[in-house]
Image: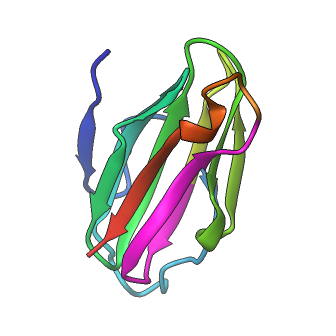
């Protein structure tokens, strides 16, 4: 499976219809924007480390090829279900530097507790 990283210019993304989660950038600011495809599958988050620069508007297009998962970043109040055939589109501003735990928020089998990743905001 390929993971694609798209730098988005002038507000046009790699996918359609994204929902806004988290804080919004000031209307006068043109924050750099990154769109990243994320795959959740038994029992992994791919990529397992997502690194972005502080102040970036981040669009995550999260899919799963197998069963329902939950894409959760508890410290950023992000919690979205991800179903086969129904991707979750998550948008937020990475405005607080740090390392944030990504976890599966829906029990998906015996390896569920090991299904984690990291979001690093530099």
Q: Nearer the viewer, residue 108 or 54?
A: 108
Q: Which residues are magenta?
A: 91-106
Above/below status of 69 relative to 56: above
Residue in view at x 50 percent, y 45 percent: 116
Query: Looking at the picture, how far across and down is residue 43, in whole percent?
Result: 53, 26
Q: Is residue 17 visible?
A: no
* Res. 10 image quadrant: bottom left
Above/below status of 118 relative to 61: below
* Res. 2 image quadrant: top left
Q: Is residue 77 magenta?
A: no
Q: Residue furthest front?
A: 110
Residue in view at x 48 percent, y 80 percent: 25
Query: Looking at the picture, how far across and down is residue 1, in whole percent?
Result: 32, 15
Q: Nearer the viewer, residue 114 or 86?
A: 114
Residue in view at x 70 percent, y 23 percent: 83
Residue in view at x 25 percent, y 55 percent: 9
Give the quarter of the figure containing the C terminus.
bottom left
Majority secondary structure in the magenta region: strand
Above/below status of 90 relative to 27: above
For this view, does 92 lie left or right of residue 8? right
């Amino acid at each position: 499976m390929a993971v694609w990283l798209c730098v988005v210019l002038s507000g046009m993304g790699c996918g359609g219809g994204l929902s806004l989660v988290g804080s919004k950038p000031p209307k006068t600011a043109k924050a750099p924007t990154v769109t990243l495809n994320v795959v959740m599958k038994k029992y992994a988050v791919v990529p397992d480390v997502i690194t972005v620069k502080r102040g970036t508007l981040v669009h995550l297009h999260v899919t799963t090829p197998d069963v329902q998962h939950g894409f959760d970043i508890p410290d950023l109040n992000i919690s979205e279900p991800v179903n086969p055939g129904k991707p979750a589109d998550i948008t937020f501003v990475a405005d607080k530097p740090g390392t944030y735990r990504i976890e599966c928020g829906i029990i998906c089998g015996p390896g569920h507790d090991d299904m984690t990743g990291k979001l690093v905001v530099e």
